Amino acid sequence: MNTTQQHLSIADIKDDILILKNGGGSLVLQVSAVNFGLLSDREQIAIIGSFAQMLNSLSFSIQIVIHSERLNISSYLRLLDKAQKAQSNPLLASMITEYKQFIQTTIKENEVLDKKFYIVIPLYSLELGLTASKQMLEQKIKTILLPRRDQIIRQLARVGLKAIQLSGPNLVEVFYNIYNGAVIEKEVNLSVNPQDLAVKLKQPEPVVSNQPADTAQAPARQSTSTPLASAAPAPPPPISTQNAKTHPFIVEELEG
């Protein structure tokens, strides 16, 4: 009877590293994402330049994998129902209801996908050469892949991306989801505390003036030295129009 394991190129997982059937190995990093469209033009150019420098600095091959899966948000909708029932403020309760309707409409019109980004660092059997035993092969794979992993993590940190190595259970889960294609979401029972949803307003603090009390209570004095008419600004000097003939546009004042 044929099984899925017979079609896979993975022989075993040792110390969070994939041991391949052809004598090679592989290491998988999960990389965080950045919303590239919300960045400014200057930030986008900086990220593209840093990523290009990372690719040019590599002396080994890598694989970039994007895995998309349909997102099940039924537990999130149930959480909104609990929050709406626990809310004592009718205005906030109506806002939660409208938000839930918006989410349901968005799901019906558009397919909600969850994207995960991975970088695979492969190690081919030709790079390893001949080894005396399986233990020596695994140790040699680990010795070569770990420095490459650290280099990739440092280079991605310069771009603003965080990369972590997938552990053994996480690798099993990733490959299970890829080859089975079905995501089983567990029931999440989250209790909603009404006190956490209450809106708390701080009392406004009185404004303390740094001005002395005797100066603040002193009445305004009237100025008697200069009349108001003399404070008006002087009229602007007349504009000379002697060189107006040399200007291509001449404006003449019409006599009434």
Image (cartoon, rainbow, N blue to C red):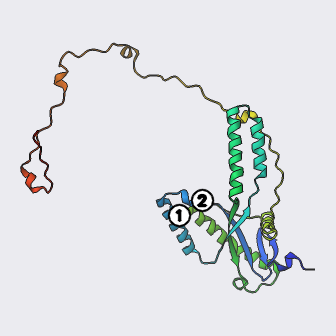
**Residue in the image at 13% along x and 52% along y:** 250
On the image, the x and y values in percent for residue 174 come to 77, 66
Name which of mark 1 and mark 2 comes first in the sequence.
2
Horizontal arrangement in the rendering, residue 82 relative to residue 250 (left or right) = right
On the image, the x and y values in percent for residue 239 come to 11, 43
Residue tagged by mark 1?
A: 47
**Residue in the image at 68% along x and 57% along y:** 109
Residue tagged by mark 2?
A: 34
- Which numbered tag is attached to residue 67? none
Horizontal arrangement in the rendering, residue 39 relative to residue 91 (left or right) = left
In which quadrant will I find the N terminus?
Answer: bottom right
Callout 1 secondary element: helix
Q: Between 124 and 196, which is closer to the camera in this rendering?
A: 196
Horizontal arrangement in the rendering, residue 229 relative to residue 79 (left or right) = left
What amino acid type is highlighted by mark number 2?
Answer: Val
What amino acid type is highlighted by mark number 1?
Answer: Ile
In which quadrant will I find the C terminus?
Answer: top left
Callout 1 environment at 10 Å: few (<14), some (14 to 19), or many (20+)? some
Determine contact: label 1, label 2, CB under 8 Å. yes
Q: Residue furthest left?
A: 242
Q: Residue furthest front?
A: 256
**Residue in the image at 85% along x and 76% along y:** 5
**Residue in the image at 42% along x and 23% along y:** 210
Give how far apart the Cα atoms at labels 1 and 2 are.
10 Å
Q: Quadrant of residue 197?
A: top right
Horizontal arrangement in the rendering, residue 71 relative to residue 221 (left or right) = right
